[in-house]
Amino acid sequence: MKIASWNVNSLNVRLPHLEQWLRDAQPDVVGIQETKLADEKFPDALLAGLGYRSVFSGQKTYNGVAILARDRAIGDVEVGIPGFVDDQKRVIAATVGDVRVVNLYVVNGQDVGTEKYAYKLRWLDAVHDWLATELAVHPRMVVLGDFNIAPDERDVHDPAIWHDAHILTSTAERDGLRRLQALGLHDAFRLHHEDAGIFSWWDYRQAAFRRNLGLRIDLTLVSDALRAQAIEAGVDREPRTWERPSDHAPAWVRLAL
DNA sequence: ATGGTTGTTGCACAA
């Protein structure tokens, strides 16, 4: 069972890339972020034609998340963080087979010290408390998404720029991610790779992709109960080479299920 | 990064 996460940065623009990538990569489950589509505009019929059921929670212009699944029903769909009032559509969870899939579009946070940064930290706290209770109900869980946090120095191209006072790498953000991991959620990529310099996002500016000036901020976390079954993980750089790409590449994990 | 690029019921703002 191959499970992937991809921030498509507008599903309207990237739908041809998504179609191509579904054919190439053959994922069983995909969490999509930044669809930027209201629910009535979501291309569920088109995706069904490609063999994927979909559930989604979106809004125009910003945010928007979805879960796609092939050959398996999608059940128990939950949208948002219970008890956390938020107009921004950043969270969707559902059960696929016997795996609980939680798809997160983590707040970017703009800059350390801003109001958006404070919202990011509050939001991470709320996700932490929610997932702590969810894991008790659904021990077989994959939490994936655009985390907008690079876990450690191996996940940034230049630690002198991306340091403890910088957005996406600040100490408080990394502590927030570590608290999630401490619930028993393991970065599947790091279960199989120790190397630095494997990234999932490259800024559109400064020819960052060509120069591999990136960060690894798109993650697939597997719960304790699934850890031994996470047999392979990686980032698929290829869609980032295509014409008019998303700034993110798909991150994936393969479970022996 | 005082820079730069992409996306949007766009023309400023989010990333």
Image: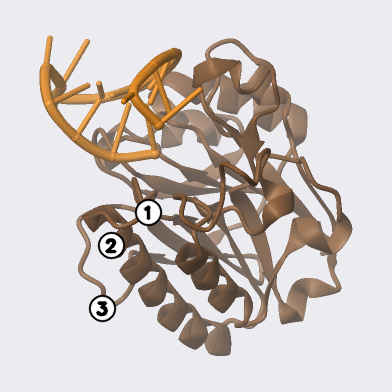
Q: Label 2 amino acid?
A: Tyr
Residue name at image x 83 percent, y 63 percent: A191
Q: Earlier in the sequence, mark 1 or mark 3?
A: 3
Distance (Cα) linking label 1 and label 3: 17 Å
Give the distance between the C-alpha atoms of the residues marked 2 and 3, in whole angstroms: 15 Å
Q: Which residue is mark 3?
A: A83
Q: Which residue position is annotated with label 1?
A: A107
Asked if both marks, 1 and 3, belong to the same chain, the answer given is yes
Establish whether labels 2 and 3 are both on one chain. yes
Q: Which of the chains bears the disc numbered 2?
A: A
Q: Is residue A48 left or right of residue A23?
A: left
Q: Hey, what amino acid is under mark 1?
A: Val
Q: Which residue is mark 2?
A: A119
The answer to whether one can see residue A172 in this image is yes
Front: mark 2 or 3: 2
Of label 2 and label 1, which has the lower sequence position?
A: 1
- Whether residue A69 is visible here, answered yes or no, is no
Q: Quadrant of the C terminus of chain A?
A: bottom right
Q: Secondary structure at mark 1?
A: loop
Q: In the rendered view, would you say A124 is above or below A104?
A: below
**What kind of residue is marked 3?**
Gly
Numbered disc 3: what chain? Answer: A
Residue beneath the point at 39% across and 49% down: A108
Residue A204: percent from the left, percent from the top? Answer: 50, 21
Q: Give percent across and percent down for residue A203.
A: 52, 28
**Chain for colour brown:** A
Question: CB of mark 2 within 8 Å of CB of mark 1?
Answer: yes
Q: Which element carries disc 3, helix, strand or loop?
A: loop
Say if A58 sits above or below A206 in the image: below
Q: Are marks 1 and 3 in contact (CB under 8 Å)?
A: no
In the picture, one chain is orange; tell me its letter: B
